[in-house]
Image (cartoon, rainbow, N blue to C red):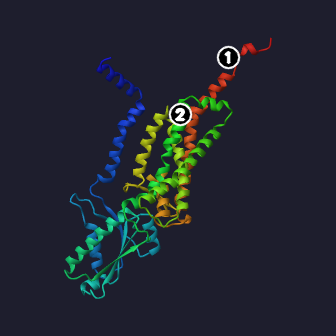
């Protein structure tokens, strides 16, 4: 066999396995698209909220200056939302990360700058969540903008006192600390690959028909596989949490609550795995498709970088967006609240409710798809073997 014949054989085999070929070719394009959406629209724009209580005109001037700062390509440096002075709402918005930081301009802002009262400076307060990776960058950018504004306005020693208000006391020392809760939850989503492979192997090895011939009902098969994967999640999570602590992550939040979130999230991962199994001919198909689903999902849910999103509506204090349809997103939000914001069960109820709904949808969708493609076919084959080939032989004379 010549080199050309080997080449031709290899190409034809890959074309026949068109699913694996398409997924291999499209996967890098998908990652390029994700990074392009996140970083390809110019330099990053920071979302902030400002409450301007200043009785003079310099507060408005400062606000206008912040709004008009642009990059060299014309992109806005800040997207500014003006909000009234409502501490509870501001705290809620910061926790839900509607914006990276909040700036409060006090009533005497103009008066202190005009009179250059550095002995009793006006307070300008920047609030944010240190566990949110964008907060640090936003805070530094705001402090630089404030410093430039004062130099242009007075050119004298600062008549302002810039105060930082952390909405939680957790000390985030690195990007890893901010990502750790999301990584913990993401670990159980690797089970979507494994659960898909388990089901695909039953089809590939032709053991599905033998299992069904034992009078095992469909729900018992799905239930058994779900329990086995949930057991793996319960074994995996303590190991993953311990690994993050070995790497320096520290949390003042509830570890049992994060364990519960991870176990609950694993059920949605299993449901997605069943959907993947319905489109897989063998375990290798399930492995490839599972990876193609998992890694874009991890980027789009904001574990590593902020993802562009479109809010659809709000219900019970929870913003529902396009990316909220990905089950990993509410799971990560709940884990962040539990481990970074020291939230309790009541704080994560909206996220867990959404995760529960998505889990039911994906689980039943996975069961339905796999049942229609493989289970009913196996049941039909089994019945055909039981029924007589020639009914006339069994008729009475």
Residue marked by disc 2:
201
In the rendered image, residue 221, in percent from the top left (x then y), is placed at: 62, 39
In the rendered image, residue 279, in percent from the top left (x then y), is placed at: 49, 35
Q: Residues within 10 Å of mark 2 (few under 14, many from 20)?
A: many
Residue that lies at the very extreme toward the front in this rendered image = 246
Q: Residues within 10 Å of mark 1 (few under 14, many from 20)?
A: few
Give the quarter of the figure containing the N terminus.
top left
| 125 or 266, nearer to the observer | 266
Residue 233 in view of the camera: yes
In the rendered image, residue 113, in percent from the top left (x then y), is placed at: 26, 83
| 47 or 268, nearer to the observer | 268
In this rendering, the answer to whether 72 lies above or below 55 is above
In the rendered image, residue 174, in percent from the top left (x then y), is placed at: 36, 62
Residue 358 - label = none
Name the secondary structure under disc 2: helix
Q: Badges 2 and 1: C-beta atoms under 8 Å apart? A: no
The image quadrant of residue 161 is bottom left
Residue marked by disc 1:
389
The image quadrant of residue 108 is bottom left
Name the secondary structure under disc 1: loop
In this rendering, the answer to whether 82 lies above or below 367 is below
Observer-side mark, 2 or 1, equals 2
């Amino acid at each position: 066999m010549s080199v050309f014949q080997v080449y031709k054989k290899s190409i034809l085999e890959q074309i026949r396995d068109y699913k694996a070929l398409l997924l291999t070719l499209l996967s890098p394009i998908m990652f390029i698209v994700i990074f392009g959406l996140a970083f390809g629209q110019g330099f990053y724009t920071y979302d902030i909220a400002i409450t301007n209580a200043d009785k003079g005109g310099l507060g408005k001037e400062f606000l206008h200056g912040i709004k008009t700062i642009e990059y060299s390509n014309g992109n806005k440096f800040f997207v500014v939302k003006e909000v009234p002075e409502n501490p509870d709402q501001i705290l809620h918005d910061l926790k839900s990360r509607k914006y990276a930081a909040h700036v409060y301009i006090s009533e005497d802002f103009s008066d202190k700058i005009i009179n250059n009262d550095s002995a009793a400076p006006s307070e300008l307060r920047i609030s944010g969540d240190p566990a949110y990776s964008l907060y640090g960058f936003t805070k530094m950018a705001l402090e630089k903008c404030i410093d430039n504004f004062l130099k242009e306005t007075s050119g004298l020693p600062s008549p302002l006192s810039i105060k930082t208000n952390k909405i939680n006391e957790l000390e985030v020392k690195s990007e890893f600390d901010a990502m750790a809760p999301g990584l913990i939850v993401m670990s159980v989503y690797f089970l979507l690959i494994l659960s898909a492979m388990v089901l695909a192997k039953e089809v590939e090895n032709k053991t599905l028909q033998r299992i069904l011939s034992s009078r095992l009902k469909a729900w018992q098969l799905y239930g058994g596989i779900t329990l086995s994967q949930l057991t793996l999640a319960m074994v995996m999570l303590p190991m993953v949490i311990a690994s993050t602590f070995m790497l320096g992550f520290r949390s003042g939040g509830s570890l049992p609550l994060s364990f519960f979130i991870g176990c609950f999230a694993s059920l949605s991962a299993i449901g997605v795995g069943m959907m993947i199994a319905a489109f897989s001919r063998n375990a290798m198909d399930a492995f490839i498709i599972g990876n193609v689903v998992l890694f874009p999902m991890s980027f789009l849910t904001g574990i590593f970088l902020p993802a562009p999103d479109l809010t659809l509506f709000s219900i019970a204090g929870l913003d529902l967006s396009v990316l909220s349809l990905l089950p990993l997103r509410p799971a990560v939000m709940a884990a962040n609240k539990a481990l970074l914001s020291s939230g309790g069960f009541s704080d994560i109820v909206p996220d867990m409710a959404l995760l529960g709904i998505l889990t039911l949808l994906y689980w039943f969708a996975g069961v339905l798809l796999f049942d229609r493609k493989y289970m009913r076919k196996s049941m039909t084959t089994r019945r055909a073997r039981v029924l007589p080939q020639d009914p006339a032989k069994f008729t009475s004379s």
